């Protein structure tokens, strides 16, 4: 079964390029992030069709409770506000101080393979994902891809909800591509 994992920061939420670690540590920062409407809409459509079409969908986001103490509670509040239909099992907080996303997913589903697709805006997460056997997909949010350093499948912030949904479905129902190096 195909498993789609979607990053939160910079994919489902806006990315603020000028923010500092001090900004991230402030109460209200994570809760104030605006949703990326087309991507949140595509995610909702994927969740609605996942059981019928036979795949799973999960939001996978890192938190840093020591450095950014509000990250856990505010990401959970953000989820309740903008994605209330998600089950707890479809929204996974990964303690970035202790593990990588692929480690957390292995604990949830066993070994990663090409049927495990990560949609993320951060090349380091994508490189780590492919190193562990998963399929990476770069989400280009308009800020993060100036030098086009990621080689592989891409989704972009200027795609409509419908285009994002259809592209992700196409990834699910076509033969798994060979993982690309990030």
Image: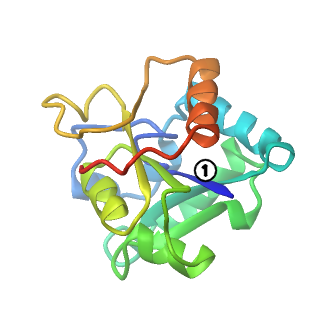
Q: Position of residue 44 (x, y in %)?
A: 72, 38
Question: In front: 5, or 2?
Answer: 2
Q: Which residue is mark 1?
A: 78
Q: Is residue 130 above or below residue 11?
A: below
Closer to the camera, 152 or 76? 152
Residue 91: where, in percent of width, then height?
64, 61
Left or right position of 141 against 145? right
Quadrant of the rendered image containing residue 125: bottom left
On screen, residue 172 versus residue 106, left or right, reads right
- Looking at the rendered structure, the number of numbered marks drawn on it comes to 1
Compared with residue 165, is residue 107 higher up or lower down, i.e. above or below? Answer: below
Q: Residue furthest left?
A: 147
Crowding at dot 1, Cα within 10 Å, few <14 / some 14-19 / many 20+, comes out as some
Under circle 1, the secondary element is helix
User: Residue 65, located in which quarter of the rendered image?
Assistant: bottom left
> For the point 43% across and 64% down, which residue is it?
62
Q: Quadrant of the N terminus?
A: bottom right
Q: How is the image coloured?
A: rainbow
Looking at the image, residue 178 sits to the left or right of residue 143; the answer is: right
From this viewpoint, which residue is outermost toward the right?
Answer: 52
Q: Identify the residue at horizontal 60%, vertical 31% (top origin).
A: 170
Of residues 139 and 50, the one nearer the viewer is: 50
The x, y position of residue 126, in whole percent, is 33, 54
Residue occupying the point 58% across, 37% down:
174
Question: For the point 47% across and 41% down, which residue is it?
Answer: 33
**Closer-to-camera residue (2/144):** 2
* Residue 69 position by quadrant: bottom left
Q: Position of residue 36 (x, y in %)?
A: 52, 31
């Amino acid at each position: 079964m195909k498993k789609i994992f979607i990053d939160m920061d910079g994919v489902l939420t806006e990315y603020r390029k000028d923010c500092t670690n001090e900004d991230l540590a402030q109460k209200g920062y994570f809760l104030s992030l605006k949703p990326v409407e087309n991507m949140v809409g595509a995610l909702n459509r994927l969740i609605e069709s996942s059981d019928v079409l036979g795949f799973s969908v999960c939001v996978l986001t890192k938190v840093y409770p020591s450095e950014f103490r509000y990250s856990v509670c505010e990401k959970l509040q953000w989820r309740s506000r903008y994605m209330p239909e998600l089950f707890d099992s479809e929204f996974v907080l990964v303690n970035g101080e202790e593990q990588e996303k692929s480690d957390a997913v292995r604990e949830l589903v066993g070994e990663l393979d090409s049927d495990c697709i990560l949609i993320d805006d951060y090349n380091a997460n994508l490189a780590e994902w492919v190193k562990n056997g998963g399929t990476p997909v770069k989400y280009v949010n308009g800020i993060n891809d100036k030098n086009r350093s990621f080689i592989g499948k891409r989704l972009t912030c200027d795609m409509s909800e419908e285009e994002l949904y259809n592209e992700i479905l196409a990834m699910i129902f076509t033969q798994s591509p060979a993982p690309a190096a990030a």
